[in-house]
Each structure stands twice: as C-alpha cells, then as structure tokens.
C-alpha cells in the first residue's frame, strides 16, 4: 500500500479492525445478496414464464376446440374465437394482448388492444414454423414491460395456428425491486449490528489493554511487588497474570544483579585497599621499627629505668599510631550493611583523604580540599561513595608527578551536589578518554590495575541517579566530576511539596 | 484513533457500495429476454402439402378434441408413409359419418361395429381393417359401469335406475336393451330412464357427476376411468372390433395404401409399438383385415335398425 493509502487508514487498532471487518462484511453481504438476487430472479423469471405458458396452454384448449369446430363445420363457430379472447382477457387482469394466428399467418382473432408484435413483421414464416412454445420479455413502445408467449396450436402434425399472449411484466420488476430493497435493508442491519457488537467488544478489550498499559507505565521497577490487576478469566486476565509474573522475575533478576554488583564493588574495595597497601605498610612499618629500636635500646640497658620508661612511652605512641592506621583501614575494608541514606559528602571526602594521606605523602603529592560547608546531604550508600572518592583520588595520585597537587572540591550547582577531583598529571589522550569508563579498560601495566575501577564508580554514581564525567587535557591534568541529585524535600505540613 | 481518515474511507466505501448496488439493481431490473428463434429446433417454414388430399371420417363416438388427439397421429403416420395427404373429417353423428362415407366425401371412415353391420348391401362400402386387442384378436366388449355410491352390483339392480348409454347407432347403445336386460327378464320400461349421449366420455361424466346410476361404454373407456371411481358391473360377449370402412369409389390405390400401411404395423416391434402408443387406445395393438360378413354375422339384421343406419331402409 502506498504511503498515501496508509495515511487514509486509521492508526488505532480498533479503527483498523472495524474498517477491515466492515469491508469484509460489506463485501461478503453484497456478494451473497447479489448471488441470491440473481438466482432468485432467474427462478422468478422461470416461474413467470412457466405460468405464462400454463395460461397460454389452458386457453389453447378452448381455442383448439373452436378451431376444430370451425374447421369441421361442426357448429356455427362464427365469432367464437373473438368472444373467447375477450372473455379470457377480462378474467386475466395481467393479460395485455392475445393474438391467434392461422397457420398461414393470418390473424384469426385478437384482443382489441393487440398490437402487431414487431417480431412477426420480420419473419412470419419462421415464427409459424416454431414447433415448441417460447417466451420472451420485451419492453413495449409505451415503456411497459411485457412477458410474451408463443404457443403453437397443433394436434400431432396438424397445425391449427399460433397463440400469442402478452402479459404485463412490470409486476416482476416490482417484485425484484422490492426484494432488492428488503435484502439491502437486511444486509445493512446485519452489518450495522455486527459492527456495533464488534465495537463494543473491542472497546472492552482495549479498555483492559489500556488498564494493562497504564499499570505497566506505573510500575516502579526499582521497587519490589507491583500493580494489582483485576481478576479476570479471559485472555486479558492471562495477560495480566503473565505481566505480574514477568515483573516478579524481573525483581528477582534485579536482586541477583544487585547482589553480584555489590560483590564486585566489595572486590574493588579490596583492590583499592591493595592500592593503599604500600603507603599503609610504610605508615605501619615506621612505628614498628621505632618499637623495635626501643626494645633493642631497653634490652641493651635494662637497668636504665628512666630510659625504659621513656622508650615504653615512645613504643606506646608508635603502636597507637599503627593501630590508628589499621583501624582506618578496617573501617574502610569492612563489608558493612548496605543502604542508601543521606550522606554528607564532605565527611566522605575527609574520611578518604585521611586514608590516602600516606600514599600521597609517599608519592610527594599534595592534596588540597575546597569543600562547601553548606553542602546538602545526598542519598547514596556511604561506603560506596567513599569507594568512588578513593578511586578518583588514587587515580589522580597515580597520574600525578612528585610535587603535584590534587584538589578535591565540593559545591552545590544547578540543583545538584558536585564533587570534582582535579589533578595536574599527564592527562588522558583523546582516544582513551572515549573508553575511560569501559569495563576492563586500563592504561596501567598488567597486574597493576583491574580496569574496573572507573566503570564501577560510574555504575555506583548512576545507581544513585547521578553522573560521573571527565575532562582532561594531555599534559595538563584531568578533572572527574561527580554530580548527585539533591534528595526530594519532605512534604510541607500543609501537604504541599515545597519548591527546591 | 484519527477520525478524519476513517470518515474519508467510510465515505468512499459508502459511495462505492451505493454505486455498485445501483448498477446491480439496474441490471437486475433489465429482464429483457429475446425470442430464441435462431436456435429454435424444427423451425422449418410451413410447407403446404402437394399430395392429393384424402379425407378420412370418424364416427362421433368421442368429442372432437379427443378424436383429434387419438386419430390425428394415425393421419400423421399415413401422411409420412403414404403418397396422399390424409385429413380427418369429423361428423356430428354416426349417421352423418355413414352419409359422408356413402357420398364419397371421405374415402374411408372409422365406424362402429354395430353401424357397420347395418350398412346394408352397398357394394361400394367394405370394411378394411379393424383394431386388435391385447389378446391379438379383433374383438371388444362393452361394459355396464356404475359409480360406487349408486349401489348397482348387477344388471338386475338396474330396475328403477337412471341409465346413460352412447349413441343408439352403436353396439354400446344397444347392448343393454337387446341383450343384457332381456337376459334378466327386464326391459327398458323397468328403468327409471334410459338416455343416449353422443360420446362415450359423456356417459362417464354423467355417472361420475351422479346424474345417472349406471351406463354402458366400451370396455377400454371403462378401464381408463376406473381409477376415478367407476366400477364395471357386467361385460358383454366379445363382438367384432370397430372397422375402418372404405368406399371403393375412392381414388385408386388409396384404400390399398391405407390398409397396407395399417396392417404393416407390428406391435411387437418396439419402435412401432411406441408409435401406436401415441394413437387412440383402441389402436395400441395394431390392426387386422376384416370383412363385412363378420359384422353381419355378429349382429343379425334388424329391419328397423338397418333403416336407421342406411337411411334408405332395407326390405
């Protein structure tokens, strides 16, 4: 179908079905009606012709008798035929004309209204030679329709003549027209009723489908459970049940994915801890070496109580320092109960900076923070956001040269909480910038990175409804921007939701 | 759903449906049917026969239309196979048939057996052939018939009854008075009435209508109307079949041609039997040659009757 043709079709399912059914029904009813009418008309004409011939035959009995009497001079038959014709015409209102022809073609008798049939003038000999009855339907000069019969009058081979009758045929056309109108009205009624029933049925089905679509639109895929559908025992009900079942499976899949994702995130956390290991080891090793030196000095001079007390104090200080480092590490590595809640992003930044402090010192990289003290809380998992900050800062540290500066900045902008981690490192090439968040993409040497860090960071941020973007200029440094949406404000006491 | 296209489409469909139905209605109402004369079988023009015309008479034992339906096929057969054109010539009465034969207006005439026996010593008139019955004999019988409600079970029951009989110039019209009643000791005076009718079928109709209690017709006629409620009460003894009587003054060869053609018919021949089946029922079994002596022997001459039949009287 051409585009113009398609444009004429209604776009809705109900309209298309109605048009298709209307077309099919109308076409079928028309063809059936026409077939019935043509068949019925043929039967009607056949019946009318049979009746006309029966009338002719009935009349021919008396006519033949009269012709025999006249031929045999058995009775005074003068005027018999004319009287017969006249009386017969009076008894048969459908008769328009009667003509009795002698074998030679001469008119033996005829009704006063008889006209000279045009076919007689053409080939009278041929007409008179006809041995079997014939009928014809013609239209007279005055517009009337006539059913004409041609009946040879004969006994054996003895020909008495020909009986020609004209019966009016307008009543036949009237019957045909009447039947046509009746059948047309019947067809229109049937088609209308069918379309009305179909329209009602489609409305009911489409209403149910609309309910399903509305329910599908209203489904919160982040929440378990789902909409409650009306109980139905038809195909629509089956559709409802299948959709509910699909929603349940989707919830289960989402739960499975979330579990796997958390396992991945935890693994990445452990990997981050590994990246912290060298700095942490140095930080722990220094107090331990101090403790060991104190122990050596005490062992060398056990009687020097004053020195021992001093060294024990130094040892306690060193162990306290190491313990503090380990406490921080455990606090980061421990797999805590997950859950999103309002988080003060500045606190997360400070927690992370304290932990990576040792690595930065080791790398001779300076970390500077520019935190907005009015920064509102955001809804995100506290552990996960720390992991994101940890990854970004450690990556900045890896990219920075000794003496470099890393800046962590937080602010509120355009209804969002923004955190930017900026370094002055070697930057990222244009080609790598396109793939920086792809899983397993890394520019580090094999064994030095999993390539999952930034990918996981992005998934954590996006799961919280935020975005993670990067800007970088090779040789000048990079800036990773984390944007998180502000949590919805609690409803006002009057029930209205205040504007943000 | 967009309603605009649907309205346009519906309008277009409606217009198409209306146009199609208008055309169909016009076609349905055009009921003209021409004369199929070009395909008409046997449409050969009527050609007048150039053969010499020979007229054959028929005694008026049946109504004219019945005579034509039964005897015209005989003429058709003679016309197709003979060298003359044969035409029927009907009579108003038995006597009229004899007069036309005697005068030579007809070359031959199908007469009754009784009137044939009363033709008198006319040397020109001679029986040619007579029909055979299903036994292969040229005999027939007349039957006393009645309608069931009349209660007539024998000839004895005719006392005080109304009786209808055919022409007094036929054996059917004479059998009751001459044979049946005398054998039972009755006379026509014992009947309530005895009325003659021109045709055998007229007797049947009168009895069936209840105008008469009984009647006499040829056995073949009685058998034909048994299914309509007629009962045969009594049968006469066999008498010679009704002959075709020729006049020797007919054109030469005519009588021989007629006799030859009719005697040539063999009812055992399926084709000819089918042909005979279209003729009057009394001809279904063919013909045999007969002579005058057989009729005079069957019906001894009665002076009064001979005079009736010949119109001249016989000493």
Image (cartoon, rainbow, N blue to C red):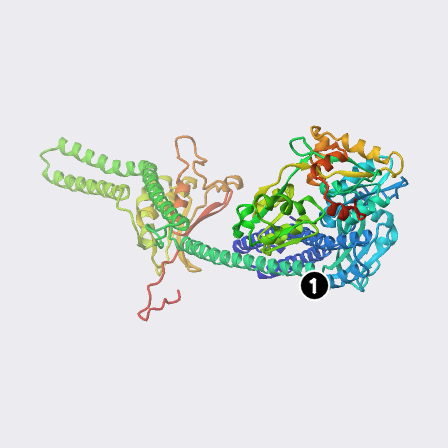
Q: Quadrant of the C terminus of chain B?
A: top right
Give coordinates of residue A11: x percent, y percent: 56, 55
Q: Is residue B105 visible?
A: no
Depth check, front residue: A394 or B265: B265
Depth check, front residue: A471 or A417: A417
Q: Is residue A487 above or below residue B278?
A: below
Q: Is residue A380 above or below residue A436?
A: below
Give coordinates of residue A435: x percent, y percent: 49, 40
- Locate residue A232 relative to residue B248 in the image: left or right: left
- Locate residue A72 relative to residue B274 in the image: left or right: right
Depth check, front residue: A94 or A3: A94
Numbered-mark total: 1
SS assignment at label 1: helix
Depth check, front residue: B250 or A490: B250
- Locate residue B143 relative to residue A195 in the image: left or right: right
Residue at point 64%, 39% (across, down): B141
Picture quarter containing residue B281?
A: top right
Q: Outermost residue toward the bottom?
A: A494
Q: Is residue A126 visible?
A: yes
Picture quarter containing residue A109?
A: bottom right
Picture quarter containing residue B301?
A: top right
Give coordinates of residue A463: x percent, y percent: 38, 48
Give coordinates of residue B249: x percent, y percent: 88, 39
Q: Chain of mark 1?
A: A
Q: Which residue is mark 1?
A: A91
């Amino acid at each position: 179908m051409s585009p113009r043709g398609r444009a004429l079709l209604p776009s809705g399912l109900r309209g298309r079905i109605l048009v298709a059914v209307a077309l099919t029904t109308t076409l079928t009813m028309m063809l059936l009606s026409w077939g019935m009418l043509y068949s019925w008309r043929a039967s009607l004409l056949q019946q009318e012709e049979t009746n006309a011939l029966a009338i002719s035959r009935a009349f021919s009995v008396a006519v033949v008798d009269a012709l025999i009497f006249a031929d045999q001079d058995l009775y005074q038959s003068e005027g018999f035929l004319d009287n017969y014709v006249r009386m017969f015409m009076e008894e048969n209102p459908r008769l328009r004309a009667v003509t009795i022809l002698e074998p030679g073609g001469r008119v033996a008798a005829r009704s006063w209204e008889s006209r000279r049939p045009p076919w007689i003038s053409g080939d009278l000999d041929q007409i008179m030679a006809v041995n079997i009855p014939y009928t014809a339907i013609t239209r007279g000069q005055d517009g009337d329709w006539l059913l004409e019969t041609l009946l040879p009058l004969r006994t054996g081979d003895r020909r008495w003549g020909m009986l020609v009758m004209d019966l009016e045929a307008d009543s036949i056309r009237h019957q045909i027209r009447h039947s046509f109108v009746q059948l047309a009205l019947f067809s229109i009624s049937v088609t209308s009723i069918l379309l009305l029933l179909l329209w009602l049925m489609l409305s009911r089905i489409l209403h149910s489908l609309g309910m399903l679509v509305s329910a599908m639109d209203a489904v919160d895929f982040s929440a378990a459970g789902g909409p409650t559908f009306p109980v139905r025992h038809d195909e629509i009900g089956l559709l409802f049940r299948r959709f509910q079942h699909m929603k349940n499976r989707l919830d289960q899949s989402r739960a499975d994915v979330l579990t796997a994702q958390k396992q991945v995130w935890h693994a990445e956390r452990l990997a981050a801890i590994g990246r912290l290991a060298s700095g942490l080891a140095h930080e722990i090793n220094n107090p331990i070496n101090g403790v060991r030196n104190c122990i050596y000095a005490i062992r060398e001079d056990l009687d020097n109580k004053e020195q021992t007390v001093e060294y024990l104090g130094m040892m306690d200080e060193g162990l306290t320092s190491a313990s503090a480092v380990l406490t921080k590490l455990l606090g980061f590595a421990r797999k805590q109960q997950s859950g999103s809640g309002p988080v003060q992003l500045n606190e997360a930044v400070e927690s992370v900076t304290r932990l990576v402090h040792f690595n930065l010192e080791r790398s001779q990289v300076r970390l500077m923070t520019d935190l907005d003290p009015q920064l509102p809380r955001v809804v995100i998992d506290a552990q996960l956001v720390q992991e994101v900050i940890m990854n970004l800062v450690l990556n900045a540290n890896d990219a920075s040269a000794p003496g470099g500066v890393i800046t962590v900045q937080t602010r509120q902008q355009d209804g969002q909480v923004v955190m930017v981690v900026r370094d002055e490192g070697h930057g990222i090439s244009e080609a790598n910038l396109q793939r920086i968040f792809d899983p397993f993409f890394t520019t580090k040497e094999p064994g030095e990175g999993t390539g999952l860090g930034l990918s996981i960071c992005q998934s954590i941020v996006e799961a919280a409804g935020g975005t993670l973007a990067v800007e970088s200029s090779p040789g000048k440094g990079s800036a990773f921007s984390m944007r998180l949406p502000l949590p919805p404000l609690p409803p006002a006491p009057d029930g209205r939701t205040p504007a943000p | 759903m967009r309603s605009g296209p649907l309205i346009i489409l519906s309008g277009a469909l409606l217009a198409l449906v209306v146009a199609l139905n208008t055309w169909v209605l016009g076609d349905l109402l055009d009921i003209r049917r021409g004369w199929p004369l070009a395909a008409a079988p046997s449409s050969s023009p009527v050609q007048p026969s150039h053969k010499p015309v020979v007229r054959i008479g028929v005694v008026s034992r049946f109504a004219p239309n019945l005579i034509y339906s039964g005897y015209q096929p005989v003429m058709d057969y003679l016309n197709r196979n003979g060298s003359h054109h044969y035409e029927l010539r009907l009579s108003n009465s038995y006597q009229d048939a004899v007069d036309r034969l005697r005068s030579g207006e007809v070359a031959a005439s199908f007469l009754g057996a009784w009137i044939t026996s009363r033709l008198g010593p006319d040397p020109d008139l001679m029986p040619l052939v007579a029909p055979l019955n299903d036994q292969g004999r040229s005999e027939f019988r007349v039957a006393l018939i009645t309608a069931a409600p009349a209660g007539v079970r024998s000839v004895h029951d005719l006392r005080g009854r109304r009786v209808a009989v055919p022409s007094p110039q036929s054996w059917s019209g004479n059998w009751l008075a001459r044979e049946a009643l005398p054998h039972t000791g009755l006379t026509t005076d014992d009947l309530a009435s005895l009325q003659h009718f021109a045709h055998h079928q007229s007797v049947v109709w009168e009895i069936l209508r209840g105008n008469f209690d009984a009647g006499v017709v040829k056995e073949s006629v009685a058998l034909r109307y048994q299914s309509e409620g007629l009962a045969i009460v009594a049968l006469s003894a066999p008498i010679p079949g009704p002959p075709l009587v020729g006049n020797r003054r007919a054109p030469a060869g005519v009588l021989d041609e007629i006799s030859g053609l009719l005697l040539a018919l063999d009812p055992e021949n399926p084709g000819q039997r089918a042909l005979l089946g279209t003729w009057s029922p009394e001809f279904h079994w063919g013909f045999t040659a007969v002579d005058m002596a057989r009729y005079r022997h069957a019906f001894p001459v009665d002076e009064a009757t001979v005079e009736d039949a010949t119109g001249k009287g016989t000493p």
